């Protein structure tokens, strides 16, 4: 890599009053955001943490009552089922959306005709709200209104498609709707990244007789890696917030088989009037998030450092 | 070896071998099948929006129209009874526009200027601010609903257009700042430095150098913000009033399970009406979206 | 014509100006969840009467689920702008009254003599701790058995079953005749509604102990297990597509004759009227089977709670709203539309009411005399929401899995302990 031309640095130069003032401008510009998001993020989260150790029931009260709410909820099947569902859904949704997205991107990268049209088609679901996504898939997957009755009306009377009405499989209906919603978005991101792969290097690798696996590991993967991390972050963010989609699609059922932590939080905070427990559940979600996130942020940072070092 | 296909076709001039012809056919077949699968829900809704509700109930939810009607669209737009008054989705649609457009524009502008300040000027705690903003992206909305209620109460903005827009602007700023920062960090520093040597101040540099180079990321954030705010439901019903109510609330009212006799016909039309603005933005901006993402929004 | 209109407007304007100067101008904004269908029609009747009485009517209907309405109420209260009137019910009224934020309507209650006319079962709900903070709009009966006329005719049943064993016989016959014996929806509250009807039919005493007093022994008693056994039979008589369904689709299945029976509250009447189904021709109704032979009655009631207001217009508006709700005219018009019966015991039902509603009043009086009226658990009249949700969890799990009755009863007791 070529050495960058050194530009005369101006930081140490003695400054006029006006110049010093102008240095304050960006800080002044950022200040409102810092204050507003600072309140939004830290104050709100701290308020929530505090609420979780109080006796709050239908309205917030601010007396300390200990950590009872934190342990109590692990005895609640709605919470434990929700956590398990989030884990299962999160893994399937993120992995499958990514796999389908990469697969689509690879297909789209074969110089296909009509790429713009196909891309628009694959991308449109991400513009559709979760409420509409859930409602529509509910209509399609419900045996009495959707696909099953459609196929049966065509004459195949014994056709069975009742994913959504079986407690053991309903969670996969949520996964399907989720993949439908997100995989086009993954495709677009990965496609964009693939276009950035240095073809000369791939060619060189092929000439050198490197195996395809090696070319992937050494050349293609490193290039699209940052994008995959971004994809992961965006999908994870969707997964954790899963709420509208399930409410519209299965209403958490059959039974409680598709309930989710975000639904539990909402239910405790609002329907049940158990503010402290709802807040505790939310804190558990934040803890889970941090535990998941630290390694990823660290990994991202390491990769960036390595890249920087190469340059 | 399918893996070889994954590399952009390096040499196009060679005539295709028979095996390659088969490969192309398989490729297009796969793409078309997948595209049809993705289009299915949209197609179902579009078809249902021009079917009579009786037909839908009698035949099946998925099916070709035996008779066509455009009445559903008129009913959904101007006559359907929502929230106990029969106005259709029209007033809610305009309420949403009134909220989404300013909130999108303002949060995008703030995001861009923040991104500029964070990446091209020496800022104290820039890294810390970055982490904080990332946390903001992940906060589940249920968790911040009550704190927002308190904050809006203090500001005297509960249940108002301005209040709800403010919520979306502040929450959205986390996303837009993140996007813009990641984009602008790849912008060559030399350009900025050159401008500064010429004596341009913060705003002048921003206006003359940064803005002209940023259309891709501006479009990305506009699309993201517009779609997100337009589709948001929980805050929309909590911080709205009978004078001002976004369209997602109206949709829920039309299609919720525990409402009137299933009106799939105009329910579908209403869903489509609500989906049109984000879809239009995606189709118009989609090309730039891809370009914007490539250039760094996600790196 | 034009001139009179103008004159009219001027007079009205003066009248408003004068009255505004003299006293507050009644205004209200009712927060409720009746955003569509027959429910919306019913609440709009209140709006019409309120406007006619000189008030300025406004409403905030929250779509979706009850928790959305509660979320909205909580957000409003903690942002310092509590709604002037909100639709709430059961023990929740008492919980909100304990916060001290509710308005005291005792003066109005005394002057209008509410205590003498409101159904005695409701007085303690509307007047927790001796303060009237709410007014009842209606009485809903939960334990209804709706039967399809055509299905009954097909199997040649002569009368509606009076006990669960009788019901089971008829259901078997329908099954054999290719009719779905039991129509059912797929949401937890619909499951809970069905089960509480079954429990009441097994024994009123069991219902009281388990669902009102949350007695742990009763929750896992042999009687409770037999209630689950009955529910298990009924699950076998449902069609496979019930999960995810709302409450109206099963109602249509029953009224159309696709299904034989549907157990659900009497808001069904409003919907069946709107859809044009007729009593005697399309459907029949009676109280759900009672093994004991006692008159059964599971009571539910919609009510409006008032929160303290600073603006004198809204304070005045609350009084006007409470008075309007308590008028016999409103109680009549509203309940014709909603399928319930008036909360005032002194209102004569006219011909506008459906035969099932007339039966409702008769059965309520009989049950009140026999002391067998119970408050609905499934509809938030008996226990706080967290216990209700905990029991729903078990009931819904039971319906959608092959859990044994013994397990279900034990789990129900456990889930209640966990919520203490």
Image: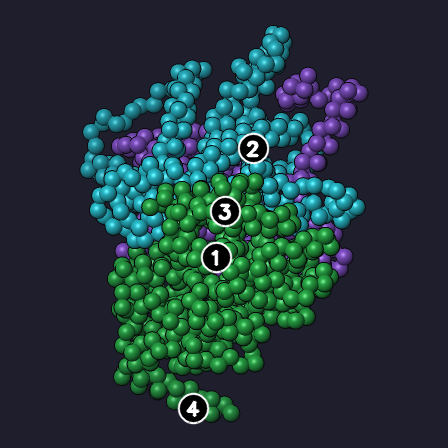
Chain colours: A cyan, B purple, C green
* Alpha-carbon span between mark 1 and mark 3: 12 Å
Q: In the rendered image of this protein, does residue C169 appear above or below residue C139?
A: above
Q: Please give the chain letter of the residue carrying mark 4.
A: C
Determine the residue positioned at 70% across, 55% down. Answer: C173
Q: Are marks 1 and 3 on the same chain?
A: yes
- The residue that label 4 is drawn on is C7
- The residue that label 1 is drawn on is C203
For disc 2, the neighbor class at 10 Å (few under 14, some 14 to 19, many from 20) is many
Q: Work out whether residue C140 or residue C201 is closer to the camera in this orientation and state it.
A: C201
Determine the residue positioned at 50% across, 70% down. Answer: C363
Q: Earlier in the sequence, mark 4 or mark 3?
A: 4
Determine the residue positioned at 77% across, 20% down. Answer: B19
**Where is residue C85 drawn, in percent x and y?**
36, 67
Q: Which numbered marker is on residue A97?
A: 2
- The residue that label 3 is drawn on is C225
Q: Which numbered marker is on residue C74?
A: none
Q: Please give the chain letter of the residue carrying mark 2.
A: A
Q: Are marks 4 and 2 in contact (CB under 8 Å)?
A: no
User: Which of the two discs, 2 and 3, sits closer to the camera?
Assistant: 3
**Where is residue A70 drawn, in percent x and y?**
32, 38
């Amino acid at each position: 890599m070529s050495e960058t031309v050194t530009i005369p640095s101006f930081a140490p130069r003695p400054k006029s009053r006006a110049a010093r003032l102008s240095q304050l401008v960006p800080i002044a510009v950022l200040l409102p955001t810092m204050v507003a998001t600072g309140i939004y993020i830290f104050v709100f989260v701290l308020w929530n943490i505090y609420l979780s150790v109080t006796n709050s029931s239908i309205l917030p009260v601010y007396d300390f009552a200990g950590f009872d709410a934190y342990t109590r909820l692990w005895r609640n099947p709605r919470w434990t089922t929700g956590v398990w569902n989030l884990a299962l859904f999160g893994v399937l949704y993120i992995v499958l959306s990514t796999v389908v997205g990469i697969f689509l991107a690879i297909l789209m990268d074969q110089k296909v005709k009509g790429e713009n049209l196909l891309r628009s088609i694959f991308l449109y679901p991400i513009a559709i709200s979760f409420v509409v996504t859930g409602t529509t898939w509910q209509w399609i997957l419900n045996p009495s209104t959707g696909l099953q009755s459609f196929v049966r009306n065509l004459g195949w009377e014994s056709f069975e498609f009742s994913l959504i009405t079986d407690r053991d499989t309903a969670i996969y209906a949520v996964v399907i709707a989720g993949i439908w919603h997100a995989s086009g978005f993954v495709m677009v991101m990965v496609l964009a990244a693939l276009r950035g792969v240095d073809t000369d290097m791939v060619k060189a690798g092929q000439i050198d007789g490197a195996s395809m696996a090696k070319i992937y590991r050494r050349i293609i993967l490193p290039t699209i890696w940052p994008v995959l991390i971004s994809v992961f972050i965006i999908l994870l963010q969707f997964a954790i917030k899963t709420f509208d989609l399930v409410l519209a699609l299965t209403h958490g059922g059959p039974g409680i088989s598709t309930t989710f932590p975000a639904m539990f939080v909402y239910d405790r905070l609002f329907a049940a009037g158990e503010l402290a427990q709802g807040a505790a559940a939310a804190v558990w979600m934040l803890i889970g998030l941090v535990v998941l996130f630290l390694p990823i942020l660290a990994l991202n940072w390491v990769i960036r450092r390595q890249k920087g070092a190469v340059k | 070896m399918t893996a070889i296909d994954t590399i952009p076709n390096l040499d196009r001039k060679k005539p295709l071998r028979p095996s390659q012809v088969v490969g192309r056919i398989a490729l297009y077949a796969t793409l078309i099948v997948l595209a049809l699968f993705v289009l299915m829900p949209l197609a179902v809704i579009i078809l249902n929006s021009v079917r009579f509700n009786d037909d839908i109930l009698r035949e099946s939810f998925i099916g070709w129209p035996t008779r066509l009607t455009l009445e559903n669209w008129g009913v959904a737009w101007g006559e359907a009874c929502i929230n106990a008054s029969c106005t259709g989705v029209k007033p809610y649609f305009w309420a949403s526009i009134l909220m989404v457009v300013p909130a999108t524009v303002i949060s995008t502008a703030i995001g861009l200027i923040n991104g500029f300040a964070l990446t091209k000027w020496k800022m104290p705690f820039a890294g810390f601010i970055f982490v904080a903003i990332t946390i903001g992206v992940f906060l589940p909305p249920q968790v911040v609903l009550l704190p927002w209620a308190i904050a809006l109460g203090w500001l005297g903005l509960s249940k108002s257009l301005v209040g709800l827009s403010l919520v979306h602007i502040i929450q959205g700023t986390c996303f837009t700042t993140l996007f813009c920062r990641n984009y602008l960090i790849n912008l060559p520093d030399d350009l900025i430095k050159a401008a500064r040597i010429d004596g341009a101040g913060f705003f002048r540099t921003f206006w003359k150098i940064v803005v002209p180079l940023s259309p891709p990321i501006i479009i990305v954030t506009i699309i993201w913000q517009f779609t997100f705010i337009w589709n948001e439901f929980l805050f929309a019903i909590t911080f709205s009033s009978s004078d001002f109510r976004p369209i997602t609330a109206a949709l829920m009212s039309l299609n919720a399970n525990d409402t009137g006799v299933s009106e799939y016909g105009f329910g579908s039309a209403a869903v489509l009406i609500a989906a049109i603005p984000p879809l239009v933005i995606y189709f118009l901006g989609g090309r730039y979206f891809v370009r914007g993402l490539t250039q760094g929004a996600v790196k | 014509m034009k001139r009179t209109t103008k004159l009219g407007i001027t007079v009205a304007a003066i009248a408003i100006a004068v009255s505004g100067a003299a006293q507050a101008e009644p205004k209200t904004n009712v927060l409720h969840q009746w955003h569509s269908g027959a429910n919306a029609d019913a609440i709009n009747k209140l709006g019409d009467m309120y406007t006619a009485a000189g008030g300025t009517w406004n409403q905030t209907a929250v779509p979706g689920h009850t928790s959305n309405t509660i979320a909205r109420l909580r957000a409003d209260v903690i942002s310092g702008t509590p709604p002037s009137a909100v639709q709430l019910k059961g023990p929740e009224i008492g919980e909100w009254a304990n916060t001290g934020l509710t308005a005291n309507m005792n003066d109005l209650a005394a002057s209008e003599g509410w205590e003498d006319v409101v159904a005695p079962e409701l007085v303690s709900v509307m007047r927790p701790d001796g303060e009237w903070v709410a007014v009842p709009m209606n009485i809903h009966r939960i334990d209804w058995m709706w039967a399809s006329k055509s299905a009954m005719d097909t199997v040649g049943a002569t009368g509606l079953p009076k006990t669960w064993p009788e019901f089971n016989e008829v259901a078997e016959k329908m099954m054999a005749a290719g009719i779905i014996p039991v129509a059912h929806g797929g949401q937890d509250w619909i499951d809970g509604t069905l089960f509480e009807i079954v429990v009441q039919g097994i024994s009123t005493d069991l219902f009281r102990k388990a669902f009102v007093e949350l007695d742990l022994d009763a929750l896992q008693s042999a009687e409770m297990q037999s209630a689950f056994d009955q529910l298990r039979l009924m699950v076998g008589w449902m069609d496979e597509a019930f999960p995810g369904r709302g409450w109206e689709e099963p109602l249509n299945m029953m009224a159309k004759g696709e299904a034989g029976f549907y157990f659900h509250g009497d808001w069904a009447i409003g919907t069946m009227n709107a859809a044009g189904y007729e009593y005697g021709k399309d459907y029949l109704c009676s109280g759900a089977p009672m093994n004991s032979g006692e008159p059964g009655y599971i009571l539910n009631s919609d009510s409006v709670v008032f929160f303290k207001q600073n603006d004198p217009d809204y304070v005045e508006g609350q009084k006007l709203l409470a008075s309007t709700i308590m008028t016999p005219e409103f109680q009549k018009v509203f309940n014709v539309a909603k399928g319930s019966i008036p909360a005032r015991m002194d209102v004569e039902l006219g011909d506008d009411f459906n035969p099932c509603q007339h039966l409702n009043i008769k059965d309520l009086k009989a049950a009140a005399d026999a002391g067998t009226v119970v408050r609905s658990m499934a509809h938030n009249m008996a226990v706080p929401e967290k216990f209700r949700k905990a029991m729903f969890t078990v009931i819904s799990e039971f319906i959608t899995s092959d859990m044994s009755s013994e397990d279900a009863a034990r789990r129900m007791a456990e889930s209640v302990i966990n919520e203490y």
